[in-house]
Image (tube, rainbow, N blue to C red):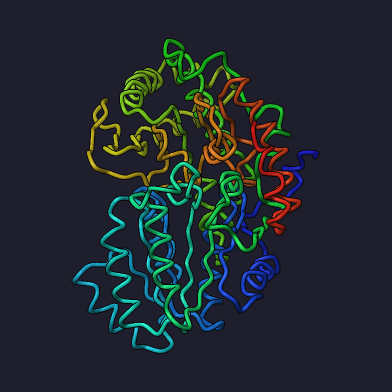
Amino acid sequence: MINKAEERILIFKESNEEDKLEVIENIFKNEKNEKILCIGDVQSGKTSMMIQVIKSSISKGYNATIIFGGSTKILIEQTTKRLKDEFYNNHSFRVYQVINKESIDEIDSDLRINDLHLVFVLIKSKSIDENLINLLHIFCWHFTLQRGVIFMDDECDSYSLVFEKEAEASEKTIANKINNFYNSLKEKQNFRTKYLSITATPFDNIRFNGENKYDRSVLLKTNKEYTGNEYFLDRNDFYLLINSSYNNPDSWPDIIKKAFDRWICDTFTLLSKPENLQRVKHLENSKDKYAKAELERLTHSEFVININVKKPTHEKCRKILFKVIANSFSQASIDKYAKENNFSLQEFKKFFEKLRNHLCIYLVNSNPCRYTWEDNKFKEEKNIEYVSGECIFQILIGGNKISRGLTINNLITEIMLSAPDSESECDTLLQKSRWFGYRMLTANYMHVFTNENIKEKYKKAQKCLNFIHEHGNDIEKLIAKKGDWKI
């Protein structure tokens, strides 16, 4: 595949309407109750497709949707906000995230309205028990089930997959709790449902397709603006190889310095390129529904250090990063950046002043913190969760919370040192790839710092993806291939 990024139109769009309609008709083509594996590429618009399915389900006679979202608060908030924004002015929908004694009365009242569709978003964590008990009570006593319930298990390969070793004993697992809840409703007379298991990494779901097996599979489509694994492998300068790994912490200061310098230079180039400045002016006056997202991409920038799940590691990286940033803010460093990269010193100084005033650094873990630069030092704010685009310049440090489901809209540079080495490594590797998505607007300014081993794994993963893209609508062919996903 020839990289033609410069020749393509600079526009941020997900799958086109014709493709969305085709997928939705495929999902609802059978009247019978089904469990369907829905496969879409990483950050390819799966949430957008979920919204389209919810909208279409009303005309199909369904009056409720239960979304089992991600396993972290940051993901569930992201999904809920997206849904509430989408249905803000649509009085046919209600979105609920927390189901408790205070909300049950309101829900009961809403259920009596014939043309209303209720959407419940539940986090896949230990707190799911109370929500499921309340939901079961609501649906069994206050809801006519023949009106129909859509189940959406988002990120279904995480916390909701019944692995072989869990299949016997584990009523305690989140996977079994969800399936027990589903089966409790399925026993009711005239129960109507579509159970959609949604994932970008279906390999383990296919390998362990046992007692809760899928009736069908449906491939969610992308359009030509999607930049995924094949696209970035085709860019010879995208992966910047380094002789380091997670197990070599002595090398981290040098890597963080190199990656930060690259982020600064690529960001300045993106934000100051004449054609991008011209497009910003156009977007500021545009009423196109995609204009806001495009505008943010041409005026904001994000840098990610994805190191691993351990919090002490995150803190070590933060301390290194703070030293790198403090040194970069010196006048001597600014002059050096400009000279070495042939930047206009005057314009580059303005850029650095903006960077100082609008930089946020996030620790993205179970004890989230945000840091901002004030009075020549970093100020700490505890319990502040990351939100993409909240600051003009954002740096994220973390592990598993970054690696699964989190949308980083304005990503320009990333350090990725830890690679999976397990039965599900193809799933895990691709989920880490937060740079995939509809990024044609900024793709030529993006880089990932990693090692040769990880890059080779991406090459092997592409063979798995090619098979999925070719046979994603044929569950039997996918199951027959299940022994060949090792990378």
Between 80 and 278, the one lying in front of the other is 80
Q: Quadrant of residue 39?
A: bottom right
Percent coordinates x, y for residue 96 in the rendering: 33, 68
Please, which residue is most extreme toward the left here? 102
Dividing the image into 4 quarters, which one contains the N terminus? top right
Q: How many marks?
A: 0
Q: Is residue 215 left or right of residue 235?
A: left
Q: Residue visible at 53% across and 29% down? A: 420
Q: Which residue lies most toward the right here?
A: 2
Examine the rendering and report whether any part of residue 353 can be seen.
yes
Residue 103 vs 174, above or below: the answer is: below
Horizontal side of 362 relative to 379 (left or right) equals: right
Q: Looking at the picture, how far across and down is residue 389, in whole percent?
A: 42, 48
Q: Is 412 on the left-hand or right-hand side of 224? A: left
Picture quarter containing residue 220?
bottom right
Q: Position of residue 187 (x, y in %)?
A: 43, 74
Q: Is any atom of residue 223 visible in this view?
A: no
Viewer-proximal residue among 329 and 163: 163
Q: Which residue is situated farthest in the top direction here?
A: 250
What is the quadrant of the C terminus in the image? top right
Q: Position of residue 399 (x, y in %)?
A: 41, 33
Toward the viewer: 401 or 415?
Answer: 401
